[in-house]
Image (cartoon, grey):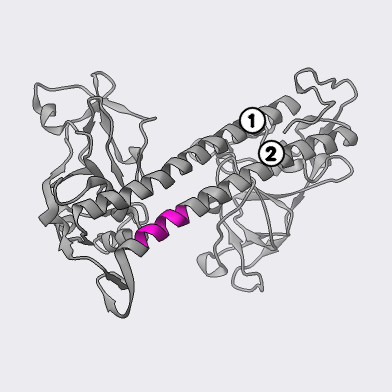
Protein backbone atom coordinates (compact mmCIF):
# COMPACT_ATOMS: atom_id res chain seq x y z
CA UNK A 1 0.00 0.00 0.00
CA UNK A 2 2.93 2.35 0.50
CA UNK A 3 4.57 4.27 -2.30
CA UNK A 4 8.33 4.63 -2.72
CA UNK A 5 9.53 8.10 -1.76
CA UNK A 6 6.86 8.78 0.90
CA UNK A 7 8.05 8.53 4.50
CA UNK A 8 4.83 8.75 6.49
CA UNK A 9 6.70 8.65 9.79
CA UNK A 10 8.67 11.78 8.96
CA UNK A 11 6.40 13.95 6.87
CA UNK A 12 7.76 17.43 6.22
CA UNK A 13 4.74 19.72 6.59
CA UNK A 14 6.67 22.97 6.40
CA UNK A 15 5.20 23.81 2.99
CA UNK A 16 1.63 22.79 3.88
CA UNK A 17 -0.97 25.54 4.04
CA UNK A 18 -3.83 26.23 6.44
CA UNK A 19 -7.34 26.64 5.03
CA UNK A 20 -10.74 27.24 6.54
CA UNK A 21 -13.11 24.37 5.97
CA UNK A 22 -15.36 26.46 3.70
CA UNK A 23 -12.27 26.93 1.47
CA UNK A 24 -11.68 23.17 1.45
CA UNK A 25 -15.27 22.15 0.74
CA UNK A 26 -18.62 23.55 -0.32
CA UNK A 27 -21.81 22.95 1.65
CA UNK A 28 -24.53 21.98 -0.86
CA UNK A 29 -27.83 23.20 0.53
CA UNK A 30 -30.20 22.56 -2.38
CA UNK A 31 -33.62 21.50 -1.05
CA UNK A 32 -35.90 18.68 -2.18
CA UNK A 33 -39.55 17.90 -1.44
CA UNK A 34 -39.82 14.07 -1.36
CA UNK A 35 -43.47 14.35 -2.48
CA UNK A 36 -42.54 16.36 -5.55
CA UNK A 37 -39.33 15.03 -7.10
CA UNK A 38 -38.12 12.76 -9.88
CA UNK A 39 -35.27 11.53 -7.67
CA UNK A 40 -35.67 7.93 -6.57
CA UNK A 41 -32.81 7.46 -4.05
CA UNK A 42 -33.10 8.58 -0.43
CA UNK A 43 -30.15 8.26 1.96
CA UNK A 44 -30.83 8.49 5.69
CA UNK A 45 -28.14 8.32 8.34
CA UNK A 46 -29.28 4.75 8.98
CA UNK A 47 -28.10 3.85 5.47
CA UNK A 48 -24.51 4.98 6.11
CA UNK A 49 -22.16 2.60 7.93
CA UNK A 50 -19.76 4.01 10.51
CA UNK A 51 -16.19 4.47 9.27
CA UNK A 52 -17.07 3.45 5.71
CA UNK A 53 -16.71 5.45 2.51
CA UNK A 54 -19.29 3.29 0.77
CA UNK A 55 -23.07 3.66 1.02
CA UNK A 56 -24.53 0.21 0.47
CA UNK A 57 -28.22 0.82 1.25
CA UNK A 58 -30.84 3.41 0.48
CA UNK A 59 -34.52 4.19 0.83
CA UNK A 60 -37.14 5.76 -1.44
CA UNK A 61 -39.17 9.00 -1.42
CA UNK A 62 -42.09 7.06 0.09
CA UNK A 63 -40.03 6.48 3.24
CA UNK A 64 -39.90 10.13 4.31
CA UNK A 65 -41.71 13.45 4.56
CA UNK A 66 -40.44 16.99 4.98
CA UNK A 67 -37.79 18.95 3.14
CA UNK A 68 -34.54 17.10 2.43
CA UNK A 69 -31.15 17.92 0.90
CA UNK A 70 -30.22 17.12 -2.70
CA UNK A 71 -26.90 15.48 -3.45
CA UNK A 72 -25.13 14.70 -6.70
CA UNK A 73 -22.94 11.77 -7.67
CA UNK A 74 -19.54 12.17 -6.02
CA UNK A 75 -20.75 14.37 -3.16
CA UNK A 76 -20.05 13.30 0.42
CA UNK A 77 -23.00 12.76 2.75
CA UNK A 78 -21.71 13.52 6.23
CA UNK A 79 -23.78 12.81 9.35
CA UNK A 80 -23.72 16.08 11.28
CA UNK A 81 -25.92 14.59 14.03
CA UNK A 82 -23.97 12.36 16.43
CA UNK A 83 -20.70 12.93 14.58
CA UNK A 84 -18.98 10.47 16.94
CA UNK A 85 -20.57 7.74 14.83
CA UNK A 86 -18.14 8.77 12.03
CA UNK A 87 -20.54 8.56 9.12
CA UNK A 88 -19.35 10.03 5.82
CA UNK A 89 -20.14 8.20 2.58
CA UNK A 90 -19.64 8.88 -1.12
CA UNK A 91 -22.82 9.27 -3.19
CA UNK A 92 -22.76 6.95 -6.21
CA UNK A 93 -25.79 8.55 -7.86
CA UNK A 94 -27.97 11.65 -7.63
CA UNK A 95 -30.56 11.65 -4.85
CA UNK A 96 -31.60 13.34 -1.62
CA UNK A 97 -30.70 12.81 2.00
CA UNK A 98 -31.68 13.51 5.57
CA UNK A 99 -31.49 17.09 6.80
CA UNK A 100 -29.45 15.67 9.69
CA UNK A 101 -26.58 15.37 7.20
CA UNK A 102 -24.37 17.85 5.40
CA UNK A 103 -23.79 17.45 1.67
CA UNK A 104 -20.13 18.33 1.11
CA UNK A 105 -18.27 18.80 -2.17
CA UNK A 106 -14.49 19.16 -2.35
CA UNK A 107 -12.97 22.35 -3.74
CA UNK A 108 -10.55 20.89 -6.32
CA UNK A 109 -8.36 23.99 -6.15
CA UNK A 110 -7.54 23.19 -2.52
CA UNK A 111 -8.00 19.42 -2.03
CA UNK A 112 -7.97 16.48 -4.41
CA UNK A 113 -11.59 15.20 -4.58
CA UNK A 114 -10.28 11.62 -4.27
CA UNK A 115 -8.41 12.48 -1.07
CA UNK A 116 -11.26 14.50 0.43
CA UNK A 117 -13.32 11.49 1.71
CA UNK A 118 -10.24 10.13 3.51
CA UNK A 119 -9.63 13.54 5.08
CA UNK A 120 -13.20 13.50 6.43
CA UNK A 121 -12.53 10.10 8.02
CA UNK A 122 -9.33 11.27 9.71
CA UNK A 123 -9.19 11.54 13.49
CA UNK A 124 -8.23 15.18 13.03
CA UNK A 125 -11.48 16.06 11.27
CA UNK A 126 -13.80 13.73 13.16
CA UNK A 127 -12.54 14.78 16.58
CA UNK A 128 -12.94 18.43 15.62
CA UNK A 129 -16.48 17.70 14.42
CA UNK A 130 -17.33 16.14 17.78
CA UNK A 131 -15.77 19.07 19.67
CA UNK A 132 -17.92 21.68 17.89
CA UNK A 133 -21.18 19.70 18.10
CA UNK A 134 -23.89 21.29 20.23
CA UNK A 135 -26.69 19.66 22.24
CA UNK A 136 -26.58 16.92 24.86
CA UNK A 137 -29.11 14.27 23.80
CA UNK A 138 -28.35 14.44 20.07
CA UNK A 139 -25.23 16.58 19.51
CA UNK A 140 -25.28 18.23 16.09
CA UNK A 141 -22.80 20.21 13.98
CA UNK A 142 -23.84 23.56 12.55
CA UNK A 143 -22.32 24.61 9.25
CA UNK A 144 -21.78 28.07 10.73
CA UNK A 145 -19.31 26.59 13.22
CA UNK A 146 -17.73 24.01 10.90
CA UNK A 147 -16.94 26.41 8.08
CA UNK A 148 -14.59 28.46 10.27
CA UNK A 149 -12.49 25.47 11.39
CA UNK A 150 -8.94 25.53 10.04
CA UNK A 151 -6.98 22.54 8.77
CA UNK A 152 -3.47 22.01 7.42
CA UNK A 153 -3.56 20.77 3.80
CA UNK A 154 -0.61 19.31 1.82
CA UNK A 155 0.45 20.58 -1.62
CA UNK A 156 -1.48 19.12 -4.55
CA UNK A 157 1.44 16.96 -5.74
CA UNK A 158 1.59 15.21 -2.38
CA UNK A 159 -2.20 14.92 -2.27
CA UNK A 160 -2.11 12.91 -5.48
CA UNK A 161 0.45 10.52 -3.95
CA UNK A 162 -1.56 10.16 -0.75
CA UNK A 163 -4.81 9.54 -2.60
CA UNK A 164 -3.21 6.88 -4.83
CA UNK A 165 -1.89 5.11 -1.74
CA UNK A 166 -5.22 5.24 0.09
CA UNK A 167 -7.26 4.31 -2.96
CA UNK A 168 -5.03 1.26 -3.43
CA UNK A 169 -5.81 0.15 0.12
CA UNK A 170 -9.52 0.86 -0.34
CA UNK A 171 -9.55 -1.18 -3.55
CA UNK A 172 -7.96 -4.11 -1.73
CA UNK A 173 -10.52 -3.84 1.07
CA UNK A 174 -13.43 -3.86 -1.37
CA UNK A 175 -12.02 -6.91 -3.17
CA UNK A 176 -11.78 -8.73 0.16
CA UNK A 177 -15.39 -7.77 0.96
CA UNK A 178 -16.41 -9.19 -2.44
CA UNK A 179 -14.59 -12.48 -1.78
CA UNK A 180 -16.22 -12.78 1.64
CA UNK A 181 -19.65 -12.11 0.12
CA UNK A 182 -19.05 -14.83 -2.49
CA UNK A 183 -18.01 -17.27 0.23
CA UNK A 184 -21.17 -16.49 2.18
CA UNK A 185 -23.30 -17.03 -0.96
CA UNK A 186 -21.50 -20.33 -1.61
CA UNK A 187 -22.19 -21.48 1.94
CA UNK A 188 -25.88 -20.59 1.66
CA UNK A 189 -26.19 -22.27 -1.74
CA UNK A 190 -24.54 -25.44 -0.41
CA UNK A 191 -27.02 -25.63 2.47
CA UNK A 192 -30.02 -24.85 0.23
CA UNK A 193 -29.03 -27.48 -2.34
CA UNK A 194 -28.61 -30.13 0.35
CA UNK A 195 -31.90 -29.42 2.15
CA UNK A 196 -34.48 -28.14 -0.36
CA UNK A 197 -35.86 -28.53 -3.84
CA UNK A 198 -38.04 -26.16 -5.81
CA UNK A 199 -41.80 -26.65 -5.46
CA UNK A 200 -44.54 -25.40 -7.77
CA UNK A 201 -46.85 -25.17 -4.78
CA UNK A 202 -46.39 -23.33 -1.50
CA UNK A 203 -44.97 -25.44 1.33
CA UNK A 204 -43.88 -24.66 4.89
CA UNK A 205 -40.81 -23.06 3.28
CA UNK A 206 -42.43 -21.04 0.50
CA UNK A 207 -41.65 -22.44 -2.94
CA UNK A 208 -39.00 -24.69 -1.45
CA UNK A 209 -39.86 -28.22 -0.41
CA UNK A 210 -37.74 -30.11 2.10
CA UNK A 211 -35.90 -33.16 0.82
CA UNK A 212 -36.02 -34.49 4.38
CA UNK A 213 -38.59 -35.12 7.13
CA UNK A 214 -40.00 -31.94 8.67
CA UNK A 215 -40.41 -31.73 12.46
CA UNK A 216 -41.28 -29.20 15.12
CA UNK A 217 -38.23 -27.91 16.94
CA UNK A 218 -39.65 -28.81 20.35
CA UNK A 219 -39.50 -32.51 19.50
CA UNK A 220 -35.73 -32.29 18.91
CA UNK A 221 -34.83 -30.43 22.12
CA UNK A 222 -33.87 -31.64 25.59
CA UNK A 223 -33.94 -28.16 27.15
CA UNK A 224 -35.57 -24.84 26.26
CA UNK A 225 -34.79 -22.32 28.99
CA UNK A 226 -35.11 -18.59 29.61
CA UNK A 227 -32.03 -16.88 31.06
CA UNK A 228 -31.53 -15.67 34.59
CA UNK A 229 -33.51 -12.61 35.68
CA UNK A 230 -31.14 -11.50 38.45
CA UNK A 231 -30.01 -7.87 38.32
CA UNK A 232 -26.69 -7.29 36.60
CA UNK A 233 -23.66 -5.78 38.31
CA UNK A 234 -20.00 -5.13 37.66
CA UNK A 235 -19.02 -7.08 40.82
CA UNK A 236 -18.84 -10.83 40.38
CA UNK A 237 -16.89 -13.42 38.46
CA UNK A 238 -19.46 -14.85 36.07
CA UNK A 239 -20.00 -13.02 32.76
CA UNK A 240 -23.58 -12.90 31.50
CA UNK A 241 -24.32 -12.97 27.80
CA UNK A 242 -26.90 -10.46 26.54
CA UNK A 243 -28.60 -9.72 23.24
CA UNK A 244 -25.63 -7.66 21.96
CA UNK A 245 -23.42 -10.75 22.27
CA UNK A 246 -25.55 -12.71 19.78
CA UNK A 247 -24.52 -11.73 16.25
CA UNK A 248 -25.93 -13.52 13.18
CA UNK A 249 -24.74 -17.00 14.05
CA UNK A 250 -21.64 -15.94 15.96
CA UNK A 251 -20.92 -15.20 19.61
CA UNK A 252 -19.33 -11.81 20.33
CA UNK A 253 -17.76 -11.59 23.79
CA UNK A 254 -16.16 -8.14 23.46
CA UNK A 255 -18.73 -6.39 25.67
CA UNK A 256 -19.65 -8.30 28.82
CA UNK A 257 -21.48 -7.63 32.06
CA UNK A 258 -21.10 -9.70 35.22
CA UNK A 259 -23.47 -11.15 37.79
CA UNK A 260 -23.18 -10.43 41.45
CA UNK A 261 -23.78 -14.08 42.30
CA UNK A 262 -26.53 -14.91 44.78
CA UNK A 263 -25.93 -18.28 46.37
CA UNK A 264 -25.94 -21.19 43.93
CA UNK A 265 -28.91 -20.01 41.88
CA UNK A 266 -26.66 -19.04 38.97
CA UNK A 267 -25.52 -22.65 38.61
CA UNK A 268 -28.81 -23.43 36.87
CA UNK A 269 -27.93 -20.92 34.14
CA UNK A 270 -24.37 -21.90 33.28
CA UNK A 271 -23.92 -22.60 29.58
CA UNK A 272 -22.29 -25.65 28.06
CA UNK A 273 -20.41 -25.84 24.78
CA UNK A 274 -22.93 -26.74 22.07
CA UNK A 275 -25.81 -24.75 23.56
CA UNK A 276 -27.69 -22.56 21.08
CA UNK A 277 -28.66 -19.06 22.25
CA UNK A 278 -31.73 -17.34 20.81
CA UNK A 279 -32.42 -13.62 21.15
CA UNK A 280 -36.13 -13.54 21.89
CA UNK A 281 -36.63 -9.75 22.07
CA UNK A 282 -35.30 -6.74 20.21
CA UNK A 283 -36.41 -4.22 17.60
CA UNK A 284 -38.78 -5.64 14.99
CA UNK A 285 -36.01 -6.35 12.44
CA UNK A 286 -33.39 -7.67 14.89
CA UNK A 287 -35.33 -10.12 17.05
CA UNK A 288 -34.52 -13.75 16.28
CA UNK A 289 -30.73 -13.66 16.14
CA UNK A 290 -29.17 -16.96 17.12
CA UNK A 291 -25.64 -18.13 17.90
CA UNK A 292 -23.82 -21.27 18.98
CA UNK A 293 -22.06 -21.16 22.35
CA UNK A 294 -18.67 -22.84 22.15
CA UNK A 295 -16.63 -21.32 25.00
CA UNK A 296 -14.97 -23.48 27.64
CA UNK A 297 -15.10 -20.85 30.38
CA UNK A 298 -18.01 -20.35 32.78
CA UNK A 299 -20.74 -18.09 31.27
CA UNK A 300 -24.36 -17.41 32.13
CA UNK A 301 -27.09 -15.78 30.02
CA UNK A 302 -29.70 -13.08 30.59
CA UNK A 303 -33.47 -13.45 30.59
CA UNK A 304 -34.01 -12.00 27.11
CA UNK A 305 -32.08 -14.95 25.69
CA UNK A 306 -33.36 -18.51 25.42
CA UNK A 307 -31.04 -21.51 25.69
CA UNK A 308 -31.76 -24.40 23.30
CA UNK A 309 -30.15 -27.75 24.10
CA UNK A 310 -30.66 -30.28 21.32
CA UNK A 311 -31.04 -34.03 21.52
CA UNK A 312 -27.51 -34.59 20.22
CA UNK A 313 -28.27 -37.94 18.56
CA UNK A 314 -31.16 -36.30 16.68
CA UNK A 315 -30.28 -32.63 15.99
CA UNK A 316 -26.77 -31.25 15.57
CA UNK A 317 -26.57 -27.84 17.32
CA UNK A 318 -24.38 -26.43 14.55
CA UNK A 319 -27.04 -27.44 12.01
CA UNK A 320 -29.79 -25.83 14.12
CA UNK A 321 -27.80 -22.61 14.45
CA UNK A 322 -27.19 -22.45 10.71
CA UNK A 323 -30.83 -23.16 9.87
CA UNK A 324 -32.13 -20.52 12.27
CA UNK A 325 -29.81 -17.92 10.71
CA UNK A 326 -30.62 -18.90 7.12
CA UNK A 327 -33.02 -16.77 5.09
CA UNK A 328 -35.69 -19.46 5.20
CA UNK A 329 -35.26 -20.20 8.90
CA UNK A 330 -35.18 -16.55 9.93
CA UNK A 331 -38.30 -15.83 7.90
CA UNK A 332 -40.11 -18.68 9.67
CA UNK A 333 -38.96 -17.46 13.08
CA UNK A 334 -39.97 -13.85 12.50
CA UNK A 335 -43.52 -14.80 11.62
CA UNK A 336 -43.94 -15.35 15.36
CA UNK A 337 -42.95 -11.78 16.29
CA UNK A 338 -45.45 -9.78 18.28
CA UNK A 339 -46.76 -7.27 15.69
CA UNK A 340 -47.12 -3.53 15.94
CA UNK A 341 -44.70 -2.87 18.83
CA UNK A 342 -41.25 -1.30 18.83
CA UNK A 343 -39.78 -4.03 21.06
CA UNK A 344 -40.80 -7.26 19.39
CA UNK A 345 -40.87 -10.61 21.18
CA UNK A 346 -40.91 -14.33 20.37
CA UNK A 347 -41.83 -16.70 23.18
CA UNK A 348 -40.70 -20.21 24.03
CA UNK A 349 -43.90 -21.89 22.82
CA UNK A 350 -43.51 -20.31 19.40
CA UNK A 351 -39.97 -21.68 19.22
CA UNK A 352 -41.22 -25.14 20.07
CA UNK A 353 -43.63 -24.91 17.13
CA UNK A 354 -40.96 -23.78 14.66
CA UNK A 355 -40.76 -26.30 11.82
CA UNK A 356 -37.45 -27.35 10.32
CA UNK A 357 -36.16 -29.95 7.85
CA UNK A 358 -34.36 -32.70 9.74
CA UNK A 359 -31.99 -35.01 7.83
CA UNK A 360 -30.29 -37.88 9.60
CA UNK A 361 -27.66 -36.87 12.14
CA UNK A 362 -24.76 -38.16 10.00
CA UNK A 363 -26.03 -36.13 7.04
CA UNK A 364 -26.28 -33.02 9.25
CA UNK A 365 -22.73 -33.40 10.51
CA UNK A 366 -21.29 -34.05 7.07
CA UNK A 367 -23.08 -30.98 5.68
CA UNK A 368 -21.93 -28.76 8.55
CA UNK A 369 -18.37 -30.01 8.07
CA UNK A 370 -18.47 -28.60 4.52
CA UNK A 371 -20.03 -25.38 5.78
CA UNK A 372 -17.35 -25.11 8.48
CA UNK A 373 -14.56 -25.17 5.89
CA UNK A 374 -16.17 -22.23 4.10
CA UNK A 375 -16.60 -20.43 7.44
CA UNK A 376 -12.88 -20.86 8.15
CA UNK A 377 -12.08 -19.10 4.88
CA UNK A 378 -14.56 -16.35 5.78
CA UNK A 379 -12.79 -15.87 9.12
CA UNK A 380 -9.41 -15.56 7.38
CA UNK A 381 -10.81 -13.02 4.90
CA UNK A 382 -12.39 -11.07 7.75
CA UNK A 383 -9.03 -10.94 9.55
CA UNK A 384 -7.43 -9.61 6.35
CA UNK A 385 -10.16 -6.96 6.08
CA UNK A 386 -9.56 -5.85 9.67
CA UNK A 387 -5.79 -5.66 9.10
CA UNK A 388 -6.23 -3.64 5.89
CA UNK A 389 -8.71 -1.25 7.48
CA UNK A 390 -6.41 -0.74 10.47
CA UNK A 391 -3.52 0.04 8.13
CA UNK A 392 -5.72 2.52 6.24
CA UNK A 393 -6.62 4.29 9.49
CA UNK A 394 -2.95 4.44 10.45
CA UNK A 395 -2.00 6.00 7.11
CA UNK A 396 -4.83 8.55 7.32
CA UNK A 397 -3.78 9.55 10.85
CA UNK A 398 -0.15 9.91 9.75
CA UNK A 399 -1.10 12.05 6.75
CA UNK A 400 -3.50 14.35 8.61
Q: Residue at x 70, y 31 (%)?
A: 396
- The one nearer the camera, 131 or 378, is 378
Q: Residue at x 33, y 55 (%)?
A: 342
Q: Is residue 92 visible?
A: yes
Q: Which mark is residue 391?
A: 1
Q: Is residue 124 left or right of residue 85?
A: right
Q: Is residue 97 left or right of residue 216?
A: right
Give the total of numbered labels.
2
- The one nearer the camera, 112 or 17, is 112
Where is residue 240, by image quadrant?
A: top left
Q: Is residue 274 above or below residue 264?
A: below
Q: Residues within 10 Å of mark 2 (few under 14, many from 20)?
A: some
Residue 320 image position (x, y, % from top left): 25, 51
Q: Which residues are magenta?
A: 184-192
Residue 55 image position (x, y, % from top left): 60, 53
Q: Which residue is mark 2?
A: 169
Residue 28 falls within the magenta-colored stretch: no
The C terminus lies in quadrant = top right
For the residues bearing labels 1 and 2, Cβ distance under 8 angstroms:
yes
Could you tell me which secondary element the residue under label 1 belongs to?
A: helix
- The one nearer the camera, 228 or 352, is 352
Q: Residue at x 31, y 41 (%)?
A: 243
The N terminus lies in quadrant = top right
Q: Residues within 10 Å of mark 1 (few under 14, many from 20)?
A: some
Q: Residue at x 85, y 26 (%)?
A: 5
Could you tell me which secondary element the residue under label 2 belongs to?
A: helix
Residue 186 falls within the magenta-colored stretch: yes
Q: Is residue 78 visible?
A: no
Residue 280 image position (x, y, % from top left): 25, 49
Q: Is residue 240 left or right of residue 18?
A: left
Main SS of the magenta part reads helix
Amino acid sequence: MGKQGIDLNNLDKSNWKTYRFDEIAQNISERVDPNNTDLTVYIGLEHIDSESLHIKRHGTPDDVNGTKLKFYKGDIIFGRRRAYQRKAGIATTDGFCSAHALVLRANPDVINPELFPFFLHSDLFMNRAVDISVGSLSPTINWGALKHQEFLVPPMEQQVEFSEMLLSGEDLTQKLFFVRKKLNSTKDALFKEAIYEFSEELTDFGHLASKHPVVKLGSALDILQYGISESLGEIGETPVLRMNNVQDGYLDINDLKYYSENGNKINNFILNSGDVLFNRTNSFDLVGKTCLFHEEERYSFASYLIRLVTKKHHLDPDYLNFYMNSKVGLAKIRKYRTPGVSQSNINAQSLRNLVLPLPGIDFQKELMGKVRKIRENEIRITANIVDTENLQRTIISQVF
